[in-house]
Amino acid sequence: MIARRTGAPIICGGEVKAFLTAKGIPAEQIRATTWGICVEVAGIKVQPVECHHWSQIYLPNGTFASGVPLAFIIYVEPGVRFYHYGDTAIFSDLKLQGELYRPTIGCIGIANPQEILDRFTMPGQMLTAEMNPREGALAAEWLGLNTVLPCHFINPDCPEVIEFAGHLAAARKCGRKVPETLVMQPGRWEELHPIKPDGFDLD
């Protein structure tokens, strides 16, 4: 585990802190937070925001822990505000998060990794991920991202990635402001430059 090997500080919800401390991570290494409680750790500002998902885990003693699911906006440097969606489903207050925090780049889930779905034995089948490609494109638009990293898949050439790009292209053709899409490839580095000041003192 990275935290155990390096001693890196951790930002998480209370239930994750309970799990990590039960696994031997020192409590003083962990900063627990929840929606709205902005924190700064190791010089990096992190804003937890609402996320429509679940957060649940079995502790080593067999008890069950559940808590508030989190998404995060990370203030990387001036002009770079990174949004991670925390596996959220789409909900209309993503527009409010975009207005309040102005994320510039973000990860948005658009697919389920088909390669691993057969590992879970349940009745029936999953038809979509937490967001399908159309919902993911709309979420990226609502957040006001400049660059979006579609994620939650294994194969970058999967049909959902193509469909996602198609929805953004169609919205752009209609004159709507939508982000550029950057599909990450295994082992490849990408460098993104800060945007110019937008008149909001968010950093």
Image: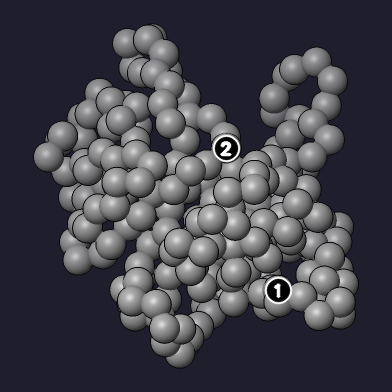
Amino acid type of the residue that numbered disc 2 sits on in the rendered structure: His
Q: Relative to 198, say whether 164 is above or below.
A: above
**Left or right, residue 88 beside residue 170:** left
> What kind of residue is marked 1?
Val
* Residue 159 on image: x %, y %: 86, 57
SS at badge 1:
loop
User: Quarter-wise, where is residue 188 in the image?
Assistant: bottom right
Q: Nearer the viewer, residue 77 or 142?
A: 142
Q: State the image quarter where residue 137 is shown.
A: bottom right
The answer, for residue 155, to whether it is visible in the render is: no
The numbered mark, 1 or 2, whose residue comes first in the sequence reads 2
For the point 29% across and 52% down, the residue is: 38
In this picture, is 190 found above or below 187?
Answer: below
In percent of width and height, residue 148 lies at 62, 69
For this rendering, which residue is in front, 39 or 150? 39
Q: Position of residue 124 (x, y in %)?
A: 84, 20
Q: Find disc 1 in the rendering and name its residue.
A: 178
Distance (Cα) linking label 1 and label 2? 22 Å
Residue 52 is labelled as 2
Q: What residue is at 44 percent from the left and 48 percent from the top?
A: 49
Q: Secondary structure at mark 2?
A: loop
The reply to whether discs 1 and 2 touch (Cβ–Cβ < 8 Å) is: no
